[in-house]
Image: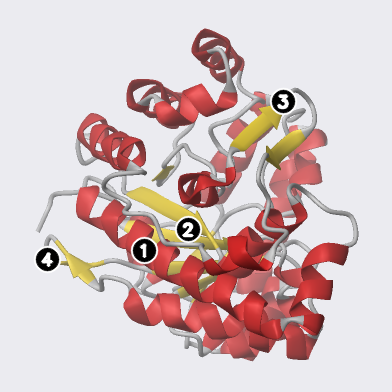
């Protein structure tokens, strides 16, 4: 078994007792850190930063140098997979991601093929291996991918969307084509995550950031069914240790019980749901990760500590809690607030 100085994050995901509640933050390597902005400037563009393993490694490690976090997460983007499928990813300054060749015609959808992660996404595997070496067994490394539904949204809409008009129209008028996109993307995501595990990722997370756009029946059909397939297809063990699997569905609180039976070890919660109520719903079937409102980090340190305490007390003195935000950290967050949060979580004693 590979040595880890601090494996509390992996143990919490498997609902084993830990000396303290582990914490990491979605988007912990990002624009709120001046050192990240510096490296990003050196890279020249966001995509160059993702595609240069040495720089991706550098920014992955930056938050760990500053804060006592219990896990590192690979610096990358969920849209690397559709980019490798040939859709032409680009980031316009201040506009978010766009695809030059979104899926608009039937033949384009029919021609969609899952990329070989070790060829078209080699740069990600190189980054994973390099980060893992650089961590030197200090904390575990998380690999990740977007969910098939969330990726399909971007692939059909061509970028972010306010109303999901194109993708939902496709789902309800040509479900055959929608399911084809989702099936190919599921195959791609499963292979991609397994390649990350092979390269050194010790836990993997699937981000269903746009899952909350669907109705309950739509969620079951177009998202959950494919999440189940991914969970079933992931490598279970590597280096003599279980590889925990986390699913995060933004706006997915309504479907928590269904998600708890989908085969994942842990579920990420957004900030809209009380984590104590969530725990009562899922029982001991899965661990929970979350779920402080990221906006709390704009408040003074004592408020940050109090709100973190509220989340910890709501979860209660049970194993199986990884502290996180209910969504990615905002770029406007003062780094001192993050320091106050990590300190509050690690020193919290259950009432």
Q: Secondary structure at mark 4?
A: loop
Residue 176, quarter of picture: bottom right
- Mark 3 Cα within 10 Å, few/some/many (few <14, many 20+)? some
Q: Is residue 19 visible?
A: no
Residue 74, quarter of picture: top left
In x, y percent, where is residue 181? 58, 70
Circle count: 4
Q: Earlier in the sequence, mark 3 or mark 4?
A: 4
Vertical side of 167 occupied by 325: above or below = above
Q: Which residue position holds label 1?
A: 18
Q: Which residue position holds label 4?
A: 240
Q: Earlier in the sequence, mark 3 or mark 2?
A: 2
Q: Is residue 165 left or right of residue 297?
A: right
Q: Pick whichever, 93 or 250, lies toward us.
A: 93
Question: What separation in Å lies between label 3 and label 2 (alpha carbons)?
Answer: 23 Å
Question: What separation in Å lies between label 3 and label 4 (alpha carbons)?
Answer: 39 Å
Q: Earlier in the sequence, mark 4 or mark 1?
A: 1
In x, y percent, where is residue 187? 41, 70
Disc number lying in front (4 or 1): 4
Q: Which mark is residue 28?
A: none
Disc number lying in front (3 or 2): 3
């Amino acid at each position: 078994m590979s040595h880890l100085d601090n494996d509390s994050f992996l143990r919490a995901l498997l609902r084993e007792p830990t000396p303290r509640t582990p914490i990491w933050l979605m988007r912990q390597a990002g624009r709120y850190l001046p050192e990240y902005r510096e490296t990003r400037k050196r890279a020249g563009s966001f995509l160059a930063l993702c595609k240069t393993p040495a720089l991706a490694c550098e920014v992955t490690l930056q938050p760990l140098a500053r804060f006592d976090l219990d896990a590192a997460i690979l610096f990358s983007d969920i849209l690397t997979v559709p980019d490798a499928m040939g859709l032409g990813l680009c980031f316009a300054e201040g506009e978010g991601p766009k695809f030059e060749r979104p899926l608009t015609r039937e033949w384009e959808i029919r021609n969609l093929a899952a990329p070989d992660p070790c060829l078209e996404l080699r740069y990600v595997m190189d980054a994973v291996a390099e980060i893992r070496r650089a961590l030197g067994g200090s904390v575990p490394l998380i690999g990740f991918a977007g969910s098939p539904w969330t990726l399909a949204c971007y692939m059909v809409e061509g970028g972010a969307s306010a109303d999901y008009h194109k993708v939902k129209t496709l789902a309800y008028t040509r479900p055959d084509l929608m399911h084809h996109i989702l099936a190919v993307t599921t195959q791609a995501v499963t292979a991609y995550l397994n390649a990350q595990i092979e390269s050194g990722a010790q836990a993997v997370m699937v981000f269903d950031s746009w899952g909350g756009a669907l109705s309950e029946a739509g969620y079951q059909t177009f998202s959950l069914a494919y999440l189940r397939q991914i969970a079933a297809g992931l490598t279970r063990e590597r280096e003599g240790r279980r590889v925990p699997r986390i699913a995060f569905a933004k706006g997915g609180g309504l479907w928590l019980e269904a998600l708890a039976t989908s085969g994942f070890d842990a579920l990420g919660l957004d900030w809209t749901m009380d984590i104590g109520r969530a725990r009562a719903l899922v029982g001991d079937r899965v661990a929970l990760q979350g779920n402080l409102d990221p906006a709390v980090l704009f408040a003074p340190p004592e408020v940050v500590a109090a709100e973190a305490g509220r989340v910890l007390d709501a979860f209660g003195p049970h194993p199986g809690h990884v502290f996180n935000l209910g969504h990615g950290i905002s770029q406007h967050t003062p780094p001192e607030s993050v320091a106050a949060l990590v300190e509050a979580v690690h020193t919290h004693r259950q009432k």
